[in-house]
Amino acid sequence: MKLIKNVSLILPHKIINNGALLFSDRIEKIYTIPPNEIEDVEMIDGKNCYLSPGFIDIHIHGAGGSDIMEGTRESLENISKTIFKYGVTSFLPTTMTMADLDIKKALDNIKKMKKEGLKGAQPLGVHLEGPFINKNYKGAQPGKNIQNPNLDLIEEYFDLIKIITLAPEIEGAQKFIKKSVQKGITIAVAHSSADYKTIKKAEVFGLDHAAHLFNAMTGLHHRKPGIVGAVLNGNMTAELIADYVHVDPAVLELVTKIKDLDKVILVTDSMEAGGLADGEYSLGGQKVFVKDDEARLEDGTIAGSVLTLDQAVRNMLNATKLNINEVINMATLNPAKRIGLDHEIGQLKEGLKSDLILLSKDLEVKKVFLSGKEVRGDFYC
């Protein structure tokens, strides 16, 4: 059992200054007033830092020089350890539009590693991005493997897949969405040319999430409100890549004034260069060039990001007038709710897993606890 004192506890609706947290692998008790010494408990001095739930990234393709689509233990382990340094304690490995065999290889690997566990951030399932997308809005997704929705491809992975991003306007989408939603899978829109009416119709049969809002989708125009208009004018949850490259800071602020804050989720959409220096990398078999925190294909198309989730939190806080706990929710409680795991992770609440991060007053990651165990490394103070 451990007791961490001298911390500001970040709860969903408030911050408890000079609080304390008693925990084992689960959160045992939250104190608004630090208790006196407790016998047989390891005492930890939080040194006036913030204590937050571990971050949850529900849209990430790679990091640390590894890509989810490599489909190996080594690659997934490296991604897990890399993003853990930035406060991510759990994530949804996200696939690309590639050949069916490559997708299944990646899914099989994730399924195995989810069961066995990793040394860093833990995979919670899969975010399947493509191959059921619109070729005219493919972005950095390889075009040659785009296909219409195919239940046969995913049928044996219903228990693994948490989110599927697709284009609801393409042939066969309605039946596919209905079947997937029946299996408890969240259906997201992106890489799509759908208009406002198509999205509203798709909502009726199960569409209720938007991947990387504003990117690879029809935008907001006063006569053609498009996908963005439908998302902003509805109850769907929406991902934001808050790197100031995918979305301007002014637009990030605008979204928080329009959408209910519990519907906004921060993601990285990171590719293999996440956490690394400028240079040449790969995404879905395509060359990607990283320079000045931007990742682009040879033709200039944005190819994911090199964003880390802790930086996304800092960026969102700087771009808006939100409170710290409101922004932290976007990287913790909101994604946990989206994938139906808020009863296990995503907030400081008695009985939930002790996935915790200690943050400086500048929201820099200082320590990370996974199920109550502090995982040490040269990236800690």
Image: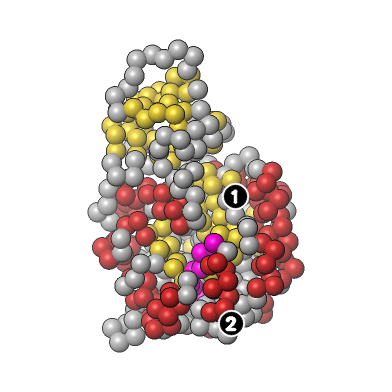
Region of the chain picked out in magenta, as a range: 184-191
Side of 357 relative to 298 (left or right): left
* Rendered position, 29 above or below 152: above
Name the residue type under label 1: Pro
Q: Residue 104 in the image: x percent, y percent?
A: 71, 64
Q: Is residue 152 magenta?
A: no
Side of 115 relative to 94 (left or right): right
* Rendered position, 305 above or below 73: below
Name the residue type under label 2: Gly
Instruction: Answer with mark 1 or mark 2, whichever residue precedes in sequence.
Output: 1
**Residue at the front extreme of this rendering:** 182
Characterize the local packing of mark 1: few (<14), some (14-19) or many (20 or more) Cα atoms within 10 angstroms: many
Q: Which residue is mark 2?
A: 172
Q: Residue 323 in the image: x percent, y percent?
A: 27, 48
For the point 41% across and 42% down, the residue is 347
For the point 57% across and 78% down, the residue is 175
Relative depth, front residue between 37 and 85: 37
Residue 131 visible: yes
* Rendered position, 156 above or below 32: below
For the point 54% across and 36% down, the residue is 370
Side of 165 relative to 326 (left or right): right
Side of 253 relative to 103 (left or right): left
State the mark number for residue 147: none
Q: Residue 111 in the image: x percent, y percent?
A: 68, 53
* Rendered position, 37 above or below 50: above
Residue 271 visible: no
State the mark number for residue 123: 1
Characterize the local packing of mark 2: few (<14), some (14-19) or many (20 or more) Cα atoms within 10 angstroms: some
Snapshot quadrant of residue 95: bottom right
